[in-house]
Amino acid sequence: MRHRRVAVAVAAFALLGVAACGDDSDDKGTPAAVPPGASAPAASGGSPAAPGGESVAPGGTPAAPGAVPTEGTASQQPPKKGGGANQRPAGKGAVEPDVLSAAGLGPYAIGVAQPDLKSAQLIGAVSTKHDCATAKGLSDYASPGLAFSDGKLERISVTSRDISTATGAEVGTTYAKVKAMYPSGKQLDDWVGAKAWFTLDGGNALLFVIKDDRVASMQAGPAQALQFHHTDNQGC
């Protein structure tokens, strides 16, 4: 009888030990193990994380922080008149307000919206014909001629010697010197045989109109539009 009571007591103690193990609070909050290299599930409504902590745009494309805009586009609105209007154009823009590049001149960046320049008081009266509009820039920038297509700046024309390119080309420079400055360029003849030197810079270009063997004017804008305007007198 005594042996039977001892066996019952041992069984009771064993049951209590099992119950205690089942109620162990440390086991309740242990998350499931994640295999190495596997991504944790994204929070509800959020975007998944890319390797290295980069944010990922919808569709799975990693965002590119600090991406540089392509040449021929304006990344921000122009400054107000008199408010430090020395903003360089997007892309390979001019460093100084008196330097013409294929991307623009000072605040006159190729692709900038006409209403933005107007509201910033950086252009004068606008003349409109069909889908094209023309205006003059400020005298601070030697009053460049501006041509707009579909409301965006498409071509800049300079006739003042106060403006030069980064290589030093300006109105009055000899044709031979311009060709030496831009050896990868090519000659373009217009519909009456007048020549110009055309040089690409990304998607944009510089065009030097030649008269009496010297530069008579300099133009900047999208390459295709600039070439077509000179050779066929078409477009804006």
Image (tube, helix red, strand yellow):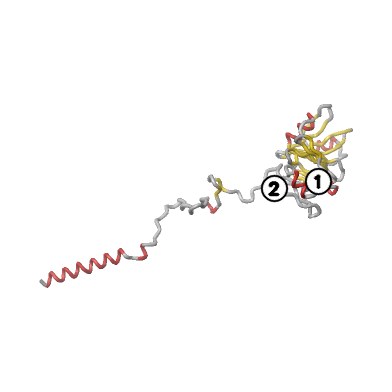
In the image, 91 versus 228, the foreground residue is 228
Which residue lies at the image location 51% right of the left edge and 52% below the top edge? 46
Number of residues whose C-alpha sits closer than 10 Å to that of mark 1, classed few (under 14), some (14–19) or many (20 or more): many
Quarter where residue 130 is shown? top right
Q: Which residue position is annotated with label 1?
A: 123
Alpha-carbon span between mark 1 and mark 2:
19 Å
Identify the element where label 2 is drawn: loop
Residue 193 in the figure: left or right of residue 73 = right
Q: Indicate the position of residue 183 as horizontal and vertical percent values.
A: 77, 36
Above or below, 123 relative to 214: below
Q: Indicate the position of residue 36 as horizontal and vertical percent values.
A: 44, 52
Residue 13 in the figure: left or right of residue 193 = left
Quarter the C terminus occupies? top right
Residue 166 in the figure: left or right of residue 26 = right
The answer to whether residue 168 of the structure is visible from this angle is no
Q: Which three-letter amino acid code belongs to the residue tagged 1?
A: Ile
Q: Which residue position is annotated with label 2?
A: 75
Quick one: label 1 or label 2, which is nearer the N terminus? 2
> Are the residues at dot 1 and dot 2 in contact (C-beta closer than 8 Å)?
no
Which residue lies at the image location 21% right of the left edge and 68% below the top edge? 12
Quarter where residue 125 is shown? top right
The answer to whether residue 72 of the structure is visible from this angle is yes
Quarter the N terminus occupies? bottom left
In the image, 97 versus 23, the foreground residue is 23
Above or below, 33 relative to 163: below
Identify the element where label 1 is drawn: loop
Depth-wise, is mark 1 or mark 2 nearer the camera?
A: 1
Q: Which three-letter amino acid code belongs to the residue tagged 2?
A: Ser
Report the residue that reaches farthest toward the left. Answer: 1
